[in-house]
């Protein structure tokens, strides 16, 4: 058996600490101004918030300056992402493009498209969504059947994508589309990635309401939607190589283990400065898991910085991270201080609300971005077991 995993220890350099303070000061200011609440809740300011983050230079941080980027390191980007998530800032308008769509365009997009879109992503103007999943093609993304058929100057798209997060607010989708049948030799052959105008004629977005009662994802139906040739990303029929790279970006960041973190913060708060031994030991255990995950995730950021594509390591971080964050609300519930008969004060309501929200989002965590079983398949391959 061969083990090919690598998790080099990474220490954040001093400039990252300075940057962290800068981001915290910005977020404090935005919280005080009422742009968002670290306790969550409905927020309609995501587009305006994205522009402010863009103006600070915190979107597209690692991209070349010629495309509106800032040529900073993946570790600096990591710090910004971590602070945004820990404060529950409304990043949804720009986070997908910053993490996934922008790097894809940068790596495989045509020059004119890079010049047109990347600066607008970096300024916080454009919102992107991801069109991989279809009703009969989830884990097996290479079974996608939504078609792009060649026409004069471009392609006509017909079919359906599903579970498309934030499609209803998006300007563009990066869609994986069938341009040829698969071949006997390679069942992944025949798919191509395109930038599709998500507001184009022929697109219908049908809301899907999730367990929390919110509209976060959609079914997107394409009826003869025109996409120009210039919006093809990479090589025709060869997307299987690119989609794998995209997933490495999607799986590696702190966004894969900080979604229920708020419940732990609330537990620490309601437990006070002198928790009993049972609670102190429980909090210590959770924080130890968190610290380990964080070091592993940082290590992946370090490898991205070194120009590698650490797909198996990213899969491990996502598998361990999402399992931990999925279990967290239940652990917090079990650890919470026993409440007496006195009427709960407003602080307890905050605790209950955090638990309610994180309990409801927990089931999705091991599905989005690749299911637990699929990730373990990737890990097994990395270990040389399959
Ligand atoms: C909150 C959320 C947001 C999402 N956002 C997006 C988005 O923006 N864009 C997008 O394209 N998709 C999105 N998805 C879809 C997500 O990527 C898919 O749900 C996921 O890939 C699983 O696909 P599926 O639901 O079709 O399940 P299936 O693939 O049908 O899997 C069903 C079960 O079978 C198991 N299974 C499947 N294949 C294997 C295998 N080879 N070995 C072992 N077990 C296997 C799975 O682990 C799972 O338990 C989102 C999903 C969620 C929950």
Image (tube, rainbow, N blue to C red):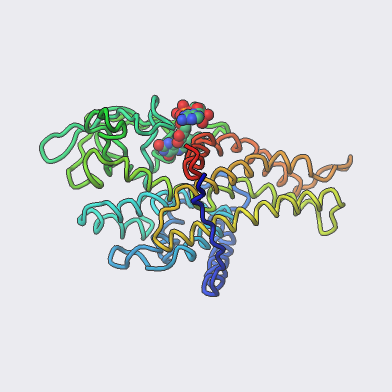
In this view of the protein, which residue sits in the foreground, 198 or 43? 198
42 lies left or right of 162: right
In this view of the protein, which residue sits in the foreground, 32 or 8? 8
Q: Residue at x 58, y 59 (%)?
A: 31
249 lies left or right of 204: right
Q: Quadrant of residue 120?
A: bottom left
In this view of the protein, which residue sits in the foreground, 219 or 44? 219
User: Horizontal and vertical percent for residue 386?
Assistant: 47, 37
User: Horizontal and vertical percent for residue 285?
Assistant: 74, 51
Residue 209 is at least partly visible in this image: no
Q: Residue at x 79, y 44 (%)?
A: 336
Location of residue 135 with respect to 360 vertically, above or below: above
**How many numbered marks have been drawn onto this rendered protein structure?**
0
Q: Quadrant of residue 50?
A: bottom left
User: Horizontal and vertical percent for residue 190?
Assistant: 25, 34
User: Horizontal and vertical percent for residue 280?
Assistant: 81, 53
């Amino acid at each position: 058996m061969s083990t090919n995993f690598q998790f080099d220890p990474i220490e954040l350099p001093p400039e990252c600490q300075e940057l962290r303070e800068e981001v915290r000061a910005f977020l404090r200011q935005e919280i005080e101004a009422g742009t968002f609440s670290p306790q969550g809740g409905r927020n309609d300011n995501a587009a305006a918030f994205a522009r402010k983050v863009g103006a600070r230079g915190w979107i597209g941080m690692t991209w070349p300056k010629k495309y509106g980027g800032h040529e900073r390191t993946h570790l600096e980007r990591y710090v910004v992402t971590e602070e945004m998530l820990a404060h529950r800032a409304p990043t949804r308008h720009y986070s997908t493009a910053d993490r996934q769509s922008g790097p894809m365009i940068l790596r495989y997009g045509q020059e004119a498209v890079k010049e047109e879109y990347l600066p607008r992503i970096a300024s916080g103007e454009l919102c992107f969504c991801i069109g991989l999943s279809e009703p009969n093609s989830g884990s097996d993304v290479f079974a996608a059947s939504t078609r792009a058929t060649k026409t004069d100057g471009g392609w006509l798209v017909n079919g359906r994508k599903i579970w498309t997060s934030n499609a209803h607010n998006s300007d563009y989708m990066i869609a994986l589309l069938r341009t040829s049948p698969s071949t006997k030799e390679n069942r992944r052959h025949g798919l191509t990635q395109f930038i599709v105008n998500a507001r184009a004629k022929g697109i219908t977005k049908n809301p899907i309401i999730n367990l929390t009662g919110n509209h976060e994802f959609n079914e997107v139906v394409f009826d003869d939607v025109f996409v120009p040739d210039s919006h093809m990303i990479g090589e025709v029929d060869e997307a299987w190589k690119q989609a794998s790279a995209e997933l490495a970006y999607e799986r590696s960041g702190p966004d894969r283990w900080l979604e229920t973190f708020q419940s732990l913060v609330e537990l620490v708060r309601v437990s006070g400065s002198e928790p009993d031994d049972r609670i102190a030991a429980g909090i210590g255990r959770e924080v130890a898991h968190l610290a380990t995950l964080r070091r592993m995730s940082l290590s992946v950021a370090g490898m991205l910085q070194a120009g590698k594509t650490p797909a198996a390591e990213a899969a491990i971080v996502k598998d361990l991270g999402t399992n931990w964050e999925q279990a967290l609300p239940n652990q917090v519930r079990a650890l919470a201080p026993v409440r007496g008969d006195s009427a709960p004060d407003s602080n307890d309501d905050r605790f209950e609300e955090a638990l309610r929200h994180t309990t409801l989002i927990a089931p999705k965590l091991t599905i989005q971005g690749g299911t637990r079983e699929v990730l373990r398949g990737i890990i097994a391959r990395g270990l040389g077991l399959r």
